[in-house]
Image (tube, grey):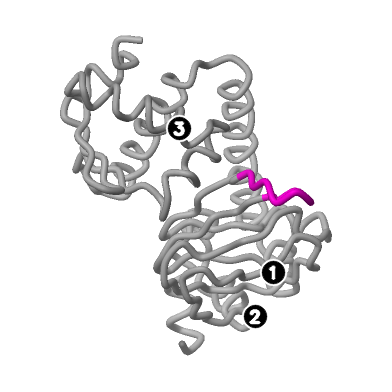
Amino acid sequence: MDAYTIANVLSRMPVFRELEADTLYMLSKGAKELMVDKGERVFQKGDRAGGFYFVIEGKFKLAFISSRGTEKVVEIVHQNQSFGEAIILADSVWPYYSQALMDSRLLFVSSSAFLQAVNADRNAADMLLRNMARRLSQLFSDMEAFCLLTSRERVVGYLLREIEQKRQHGNDDMVVNLPDTKANTASLLNLTPETFSRVIHGLEREEIISVSRRKVVVKDLPRLQRGGGC
């Protein structure tokens, strides 16, 4: 992609949507497109973070893995979302690894270009702070869910967040596409795959949702919003 095309892609990112054209062009000079195959890792835990990533097409998981091989999914990153901004501001290493859940296309923005834009444009710094505040708020919500909510409440909350996220991008259908495996979704919610499946099948028996492979169709949104009767 040329600099103009990259600047156009950057303008779709929530953190940069309101930036001036000159600032976007500044960022584009330190950006490049990456093609990533399904299953490929973009970086490993402990790698130096040289920039952040924007998902043009595809889906990624961010996850920890223990010395015993136990995995904990931190986040599933979808198309038109970014990851890694806070890490490069801290001038740190990646605390997790990133893996493509499908053939994907990324835009990589280097740390130097990013920090140059933030220093040159106050709007960029303000939008970055708002974006990080939203991420922090979501982190606290996730901690509350892990500590206080039942397994059913976690699954219901996840489905509602996915529907709301699609609505924010102009998609009003009631379909939630799970990641490549139910195990990844279960790990994201701090549940075992067996517990996640049990809750999903319970909601399906109550005709609140229907399930076909990795596709969940919400049939009764008001009941789901009430917690599915939980």
Please tell me whether mark 1 or mark 2 is closer to you in this view. Answer: 1
Please tell me whether mark 1 or mark 3 is closer to you in this view. Answer: 3
- Amino acid on which disc 1 is placed: Gly
Q: Is residue 217 rendered magenta in the image?
A: no
Q: Which residue is mark 3?
A: 194
Q: Which residues are magenta?
A: 64-72
* Badge 1 or badge 2: first in the primary sequence: 2
Q: Nearer the viewer, residue 143 or 188?
A: 188
* Badge 1 or badge 3: first in the primary sequence: 1
In the rendered image, residue 172, in percent from the top left (x then y), is placed at 20, 42
Q: Which residue is mark 2?
A: 30
Q: Does the CB distance between marks 1 and 2 fall below 8 Å?
A: yes
Q: Does the CB distance between marks 2 and 3 fall below 8 Å?
A: no
Q: Is residue 154 above or below residue 42?
A: above
Name the outermost residue toward the top.
230
On residue 51, the disc is 1
Label 1 to label 2: alpha-carbon separation = 9 Å
- Amino acid on which disc 3 is placed: Glu
Position of residue 195 in the picture relative to residue 82 (left or right): left
Q: Nearer the viewer, residue 4 or 225?
A: 225
What residue appears at the point 46 percent right and 87 percent down from the top-left corner?
Answer: 1
Name the outermost residue toward the bottom.
2
Q: Residues within 10 Å of mark 1 (few under 14, many from 20)?
A: many
What residue appears at the point 76 percent right and 53 percent down from the top-left corner?
Answer: 95
In the rendered image, residue 64, in percent from the top left (x then y), is placed at 69, 50
